[in-house]
């Protein structure tokens, strides 16, 4: 499945190309997943990213030509992801409270491919530990080399800390897994992501995960990601995940997150 965070990066880079070298991408708003992109084989899939300047920002949509298993085209340029991108001469410097230190932490581990309901590949396993203070989740990360995600493209022009952002979403899912007795959740959309900086490779980063509420099918969170000096790397407002039907699993008794 095509990662949400890589779709974000693709849309951010398209907006950057449209904006030109004198402006920088500072935020993404109204991020939506209309259709997932799956890879039934190792064949490459052509994706199109279309960016259009409008009065309220740069509107971006990522889509694919959708074929059935027999290779028959069913829908041309099927919309899969969309957002509105804001640009400015400089990124914003956000001042936020220093994240507190939880008294207890538990390690974040990932199931094998055979065991996983939702499988996370090695390049997206940046989250290392997590704990909580009252209703605030605290997660710790090791920032990977951006080349691990960028691959053959290398990191030149890369805008977002994709692996860390995916780790933040994983932290939201881990929190919901505890408060909802073992449910599995996947990204559904984001109200806004404000971008401030990129971390150094290997840097120890911290995220606060603020649980904002839930209904039968969704959980909602705000997230702030900090570097090792407690400077804000990015801020996520209104991240929503979707609960996978029938995914309830027994919660580990060793979990230190408080419902």
Image (cartoon, rainbow, N blue to C red):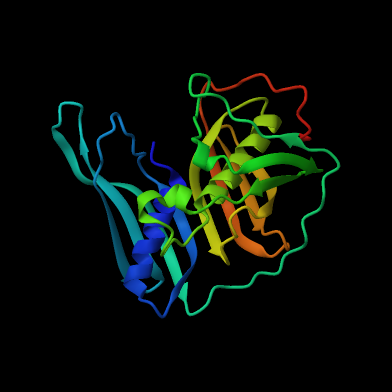
Q: Nearer the viewer, residue 172 or 197?
A: 197
Q: Is residue 163 visible?
A: yes
Q: Nearer the viewer, residue 241 or 143?
A: 143
* Relative side of 133 to 160, left or right: right
Quarter of the figure with the C terminus: top right
Q: Nearer the viewer, residue 249 or 20?
A: 20
Where residue 208 appears, x then y in whole percent? 70, 51
Residue positioned most to the right: 103
Q: Count up the numbered dots.
A: 0
Quarter of the figure with the N terminus: top left
Residue positioned most to the left: 72
Where residue 94 appears, x then y in whole percent? 65, 69
Where residue 107 appears, x then y in whole percent? 71, 34
In the picture shown, does residue 152 fall above or below 75? Answer: below
Q: Is residue 211 visible?
A: no
Where residue 151 appears, x then y in whole percent? 40, 49
In the picture shown, does residue 70 fall above or below 191? Answer: above
In the picture shown, does residue 5 fall above or below 216? Answer: below
Write the residue at 64% across / 52% down.
223
Write the residue at 29% across / 33% down.
42
Q: Nearer the viewer, residue 198 or 139?
A: 198
Write the residue at 41% across / 64% down.
157
Quarter holding residue 57: bottom left
């Amino acid at each position: 499945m095509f990662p949400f965070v890589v779709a974000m990066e693709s849309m951010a880079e398209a907006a950057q190309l449209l904006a030109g070298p004198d402006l920088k991408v500072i935020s993404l708003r109204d991020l939506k997943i209309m259709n997932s992109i799956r890879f039934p084989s190792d064949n490459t899939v052509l994706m199109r990213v279309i960016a259009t300047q409008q009065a309220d920002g740069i509107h971006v949509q990522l889509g694919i030509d959708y074929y059935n298993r027999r290779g028959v085209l069913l829908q041309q340029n099927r919309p899969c992801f969309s957002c509105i991108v804001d640009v400015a001469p400089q990124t914003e410097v956000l001042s936020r409270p220093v994240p507190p230190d939880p008294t207890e932490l538990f390690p974040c581990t990932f199931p094998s491919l055979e065991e996983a309901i939702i499988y996370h590949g090695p390049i997206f396993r940046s989250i290392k530990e997590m704990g909580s203070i009252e209703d605030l989740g605290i997660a710790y990360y090791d920032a990977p080399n951006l080349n691990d995600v960028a691959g053959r493209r290398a990191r030149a022009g890369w805008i977002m800390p994709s692996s860390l952002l995916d780790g933040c979403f994983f932290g939201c899912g881990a929190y919901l897994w505890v408060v909802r007795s073992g449910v599995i959740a996947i990204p559904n959309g984001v109200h806004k992501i404000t971008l401030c900086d990129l971390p150094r490779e290997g840097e120890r980063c911290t995220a606060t995960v603020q649980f904002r509420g839930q209904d039968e099918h969704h959980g909602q969170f705000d997230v702030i990601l900090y570097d090792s000096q407690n400077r804000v790397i990015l801020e996520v407002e209104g991240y929503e995940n979707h609960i996978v039907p029938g995914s309830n699993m027994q919660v580990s008794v060793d979990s230190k997150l408080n419902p």
